[in-house]
Amino acid sequence: MSPNSNSGGLTLNGLERQVVSRMKSGSNRYFVVVLIFGLLMLAGSIAGLMATVGGHHVYYNVNRELAWGVLISTYVYFVVTSTGLCLVSSIGHIFGVESFMPLAKRAVFLAIVTLCAGFFVICAEIKVPIRMMLYNIISPNLTSNIWWMGTLYGVALAVMILEFIFLYTNKVKLAVICGFTAAVGEIAANSNLAGVFGLLNGRDFWHGAFLPIFFIGSAVMTGAAALIFFHVLAYRVNHEIMDDPMLRAMQGCRKVAILGICIVSFFTIWRMVSLVAGEPSGAYLGAMAMIKGSYAFSFWVFEIGFALVLPLILYIRSQGTNLRMMLVASTLMIIGLFFMRYNMVIVGQAIPVYYSLGVNGSKELIKYFPSYLEILVTLGGFGLTGFLFLLGEKVFGGHKMDAHH
Amino acid sequence: MKKQLLDLDKSHNEGVENISAEERRNFLKMGLTLTGVFASGTLFSLVGSAQKVFASDAAFVEKYPYKPHYSMMVHVDRCIDCERCKKACAMTNDVPDYGFRTNILEREVPNAIGVKTEFIPVLCNHCNLSQCTRVCPTKATYKNPSNGIVMMDTTKCIGCLSCQMACPYNARYFHEEKMAVDKCSFCWESRLSKGEKLTACAEACPAGARIFGDLSNPKDQVYKKVHQIEKTVWVLRPEAGTKPNVFYTRG
């Protein structure tokens, strides 16, 4: 293939010139922020590598009983966000709701980026990631939720990359097929991720059908918040003012976010009631830790305040027109949801498996706080997301929608 | 057709000496079932407890899935926490300082009458419905198809630790040197496969707190201890539903 071969009427040299000129259009502040995110990503990579080589037991604060720390909850956070982005954007470019259509390109791009961030973090958490690549393929266990989750997210990632390419090469039909496949894959992967926790009979705090259902509702809420957050920011980065179709898309996202918050609030209330009423063995201990124990601040301030109550008030008050208020609401949600995942993952394990026996050392919650390296890897995930988001804004020219979309 | 009634007065007494132990047991169980004791739970019914330890439905009681079906009976009141079992296990199976394949839990009941402290040896329960093997994405941990031991194929372990999450008995840890999760294998690699009859912990216990044997062999002492009705036998965390093969009793 000649280096000057045509790609949608544009030569490779022309494409290169275009990308370079777009990058040059970035302000100094833009490059400083890109650099900060890049450095965070680098620091996270080094931290993850150090722990993988030197041993997780040396660098991470996890232990035999509480084996999944903040990196697993961060992974859950990113991949659920990816599912949410994929689902909310599919309302437009798959199901044909006009007002959501302008979101397609950026949403697919962000779904790819957040999924990559999830994989980035999980690579630092899996102890032997090299074996994972090989044995997931040659020795699959079809009863394992982790296997299904990893495989389906992997497939969804590949399909979304194809979808993104088709969106940019104006192959609408193929993009829709890929979009639909990716959405199905993401939903299946997301519920399998919840199944990783929900199907464990021995973990009272997680066990049951609640989590797979909750995760989908939660993903929709997260996706809507992330779409508002990244779109408002993107227009600021690109020094542009939102046009009417994009404003209508933001209003649509706001409605989905409000609906999502209501659903998740309803789920959360009933979950907490069910964990407290009748005092079910270990689960009760976890619930009380969240209500008035060591996780109360994280629960009431972040999970309830930041993720549910405050954004609900702000979204309603914004009336869909006050973008600044909507940005604040989305930011609060993005922070709050991180702690929602953290509470779910950590409290579920903090209840000792022999709690019901009343033996010494198993009468209280297992204590956990992330180590510096765990925090660095977590920040690395955010760094990767920010870095790729900002880079994408320039490289793909603000993910502009084509006329026929 | 006219039904012939049994005339008990004319019937011959067969005596009890010809009735097998199994028939006696069945008769007793039937009696207790009919009188409702059977259904009343473990508190009142020893038969109820004995049935429960089979940790499965009636079909499972009739036939164990493996041959031999390795199992352990732990006498909690015999354990004095000398930890010889732990040391023997560590030496036999290359267990590092930061991990353990078997442990001894301690329960203190200050207000109890008489003995106030109890020691509970724990290890992998080699469950029939093992959740660790279900969740492992790469089949790195699996049930040995012939003897039911939950094994590790260390070359396949990716270190996701989902098996640790799934285990209701805290029986697993990550062995940094092996780069894989490690767990009790009833000393399969180190002893049983080489013709030994006991696990290292069972052999090392000076008080006979750990009885290792074959649950599918009616002549084995574990079989006899599990299938009797005089003493209560239980499993840890039955609510996890994993059908464990480590049983507990006193006396």
Image (cartoon, coloured by chain):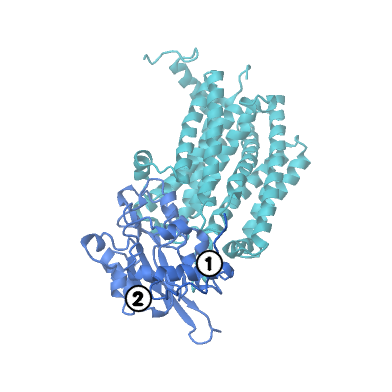
| In the image, residue A129 above or below residue A280 | above
Residue plotted at (50% across, 24% down): A165
Tint of chain B: blue
Query: Who is closer to the viewer here, A318 or B212?
Result: B212
Q: How many marks?
A: 2
Instruction: In the rendered view, tell whether residue A388 sits above or below residue A300.
Output: above
Mark 1 or mark 2: whose residue is earlier in sequence: 1
Residue B32, how many percent across, how many down? 54, 70
Amino acid at circle 1: Leu
Kindly state the secondary structure of the residue where label 2 is placed: loop
What is the chain letter for disc 2? B
Mark number displayed over residue A295: none
Q: Which residue corresponds to mark 1?
A: B6
| Residue appearing at x 39%, y 79% in the figure | B78
* Colour displayed for chain A in the image of the structure: cyan
Horizontal side of A102 relative to B152 (left or right) equals right
Residue A127 in view: yes
- In which quadrant of the rendered view does residue B188 lie? bottom left
Kindly identify the residue that appears in the image at 29 percent across and 74 percent down.
B204
Label at residue B83: 2
What is the chain letter for disc 1? B
Q: Along the line of sight, which residue is nearer the eye, B6 or A89?
A: B6
